[in-house]
Amino acid sequence: MSSTFGQLFRVHTFGESHGGGVGAVIDGCPPRIPLTADDIQVDLDRRRPGQSEIVTPRDEKDQAEILSGTFEGETIGTPIAVLVRNKDARSEAYSEMAEKYRPSHADYTYDAKYGIRNWQGGGRASARETIGRVAAAAIAKKVLAAQFAPDLEIIAWVKSIRDLEAKVDPDAVTFDQVEGNIVRTGDPDAVAPMVELIKEMRADGNSVGGVVECVVRGVPAGLGAPVFDKLEAELAKGMLSLPATKGFEIGSGFGGTLLTGREHNDPFFMEGDRVRTRTNRSGGIQGGISNGENIVFRVAFKPTATIMTSQETVSTEGEDTELKGRGRHDPCVLPRAVPMVEAMAALILCDHALRQRAQCGEMNWAIED
């Protein structure tokens, strides 16, 4: 299985939803980066289940254990292994799924590829796999802050849930605004309607999807690569590798197709000794390389596949049948997807920062307001 991500900052995730635990092995982290389990725990707490009334009630504390790669509170340049043990798995709720494929899940496709699958809680296809990504990203952010960009900010928020859209300014939104509500949106007026919609979906045994938007502030010009490793291509791959994702767009995205070139181009101007753009329809990346403006992108998440009503399906024996979802599931993945999106952005930026230094040497990471 392709469970490794990155070239220089390499992350290998492991574990299944109802196995002994999940986690990651991080290889390529520079030495002497301050790191403790508490640094990782902050983001794991934002991702974990059971944190509010609108997410799955599975009771997991998701306590991070650093098994290797640190000494006396610092990284030592060797692989860092992070483990989170599963404590509240209830595999009995999934016994029917051993013989019936859940619609829009990975059950059938895993069987088609491997001829065997772990049907307990989704196994490797479960969103619990992202624990390893979030843990690794906490380390990536420490590397970026210590060696490249101490003022770099990665902030994601729920932009929309179904047809409810938040009004958020990517240039001004703050982390505290997003974390100040259980939906994790930056628009206070959107919180109550979104919470109500999610509760309605749960009461109806249904689910709902939406869009997470993300801004990265403080990235200098010159980060990324031409052709196959374009920065936006790496972001797209990383985001679409997250569970339940169905779309990615950056800058003007699909909306840019409605504009002419004259309307869409971002004019350059000088601000002191820095090249700036008056608009940012490129989303901070041109030719696959960052231009120094804010990187702004959006990720579409489908409605949660497990719903608590009967659906048509087939059995592992190839017979038509029906299946009703059981277990504990998010009626909407968006609030918990926010730290996942931030995590993938951090992993990609850290990897490209190390690649930039390896190929071109030190660059000017100082970004003026």
Image (spheres, rainbow, N blue to C red):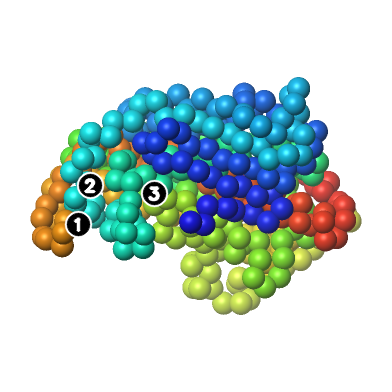
Q: Which sits in the foreground, 24 or 194? A: 24
- Circle 1 SS class: loop
User: What is the x, y in percent for residue 259?
Assistant: 54, 73
Identify the amino acid type marked 3: Ala
The residue at which mark 1 appears reads as: 316
Q: Earlier in the sequence, mark 1 or mark 3?
A: 3
Q: Which sits in the foreground, 44 or 86? A: 86
Answer yes or no: is residue 183 visible.
no
User: What is the x, y in percent for residue 223?
Assistant: 74, 58
Task: Identify which residue is drawn at 69% across, 49% down.
Answer: 9
- Circle 2 SS class: helix
Task: Identify which residue is drawn at 49% across, 73% down.
Answer: 258
Q: Label 2: few (<14), some or many (≥20) within 10 Å? A: some
Q: CA distance from mark 1 to mark 3?
A: 18 Å
Identify the amino acid type marked 1: Thr
116 sits to left or right of 124: left
- Quarter of the picture containing the C terminus is top right
Task: Identify which residue is drawn at 58% across, 34% down.
Answer: 82
Q: Which numbered marker is on residue 125?
A: 3
Answer yes or no: is residue 345 visible.
yes
Q: Label 3: few (<14), some or many (≥20) within 10 Å? A: many
Q: Which numbered marker is on residue 118?
A: none
The residue at which mark 2 appears reads as: 98
The reply to whether callout 1 and callout 2 are in contact (CB within 8 Å) is yes
Q: Nearer the viewer, mark 3 or mark 2?
A: 2
Q: Is residue 161 depicted above or below 264 in this figure?
A: above
